[in-house]
Image (cartoon, helix red, strand yellow):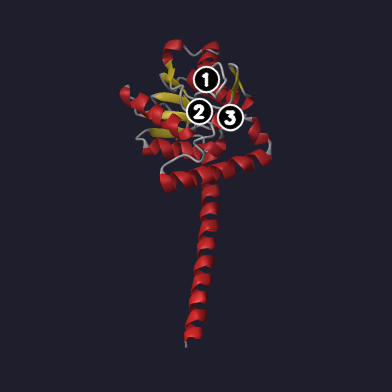
């Protein structure tokens, strides 16, 4: 009798493991689909601000990924979609300047008035940047923004913005060099899946000790 119960329990455990595994796989497939759908959607419209998410910079020169984001954000500004242009991103140890300062200088050089630009220059990951942007916007009575980043990044950015009480719209850049490399796209999607999982589970960031601006993606 006890041997039969033992086999039954083992079978139950096995089924539970299989069911859990299937649930995880299905959740991953759904999340990947949502990342792709959001990345394909351009929601640009009039808003209080345009927010460009930081990426790697080299001594004040934006990386190709960062430049693509900035070019797109400036183009949205030139359409007259917003009064404010918000820049984000801190710096790595040893850097002489920040992602935000690099973005500000680039935007000014491309026609955005200096008085229209503000932002945060301390954050080293998306979550911290978004929290700082939300605080700055709320302090100024701003409630809506068009966010600019790479397509794979948009779902997480918009979810964070919604959780921070920002009426957020995504306008992903289409000219990032990442978009020409399927392996880079796959790597970015995997990163986003991990970051979303950690955020939903803990409310935190994937790897807070590793700055997102240290690489080419975020």
Q: Position of residue 132 (x, y in %)?
A: 40, 28
* Count of all numbered marks drawn on residues in the image: 3
> Which mark is on residue 214?
3
Cα separation, mark 3 vs mark 1, equals 12 Å
Whichever of callouts 1 and 2 sits on the residue coming sooner in the sequence is 2
Near mark 2 (Cα within 10 A), the count class, few <14, some 14-19 or many ≥20, is: many
**Label 3 close to label 1 by CB (< 8 Å):** no
Judging by the rendered image, the residue that carries numbered circle 2 is 53
Q: Residue furthest front?
A: 2
For mark 1, what is the residue?
Answer: 98
Nearer the observer, 160 or 167: 160
| SS for dot 3 | helix
Name the residue rendered at 37%, 39% in the picture. 163
* Lower position in the chain sequence, tag 2 or tag 3: 2
Residue 190 in the image: x percent, y percent?
58, 45
Left-right relation of 187 to 165: right
Q: Mark 2 and mark 3: span between their CA atoms?
A: 14 Å
């Amino acid at each position: 009798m006890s041997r039969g119960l033992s086999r039954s329990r083992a079978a139950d455990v096995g089924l539970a493991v299989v069911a859990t595994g299937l649930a995880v796989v299905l959740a991953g497939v759904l999340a990947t689909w949502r990342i792709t759908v959001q990345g394909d959607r351009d929601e640009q419209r009039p808003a209080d601000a345009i927010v460009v998410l930081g990426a790697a910079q080299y001594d004040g020169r934006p990386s190709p990924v960062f430049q693509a984001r900035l070019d797109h954000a400036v183009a949205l500004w030139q359409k007259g979609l917003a009064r404010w242009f918000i820049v984000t991103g801190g710096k790595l140890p040893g850097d002489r300047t920040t992602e935000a300062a690099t973005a500000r200088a680039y935007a000014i050089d491309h026609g955005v008035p200096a008085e229209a630009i503000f932002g945060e220059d301390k954050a080293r990951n998306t979550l911290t940047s978004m929290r700082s942007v939300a605080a700055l916007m709320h302090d100024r009575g701003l409630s809506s923004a068009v966010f600019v980043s790479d397509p794979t990044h948009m779902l997480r950015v918009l979810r964070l913005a919604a959780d921070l009480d920002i009426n957020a719209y995504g306008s992903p850049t289409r000219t990032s060099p990442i978009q020409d490399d399927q392996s880079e796209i796959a790597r970015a999607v995997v990163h986003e899946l991990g970051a979303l999982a950690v955020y939903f589970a803990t409310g935190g960031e994937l790897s807070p000790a590793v700055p997102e601006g240290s690489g080419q993606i975020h």
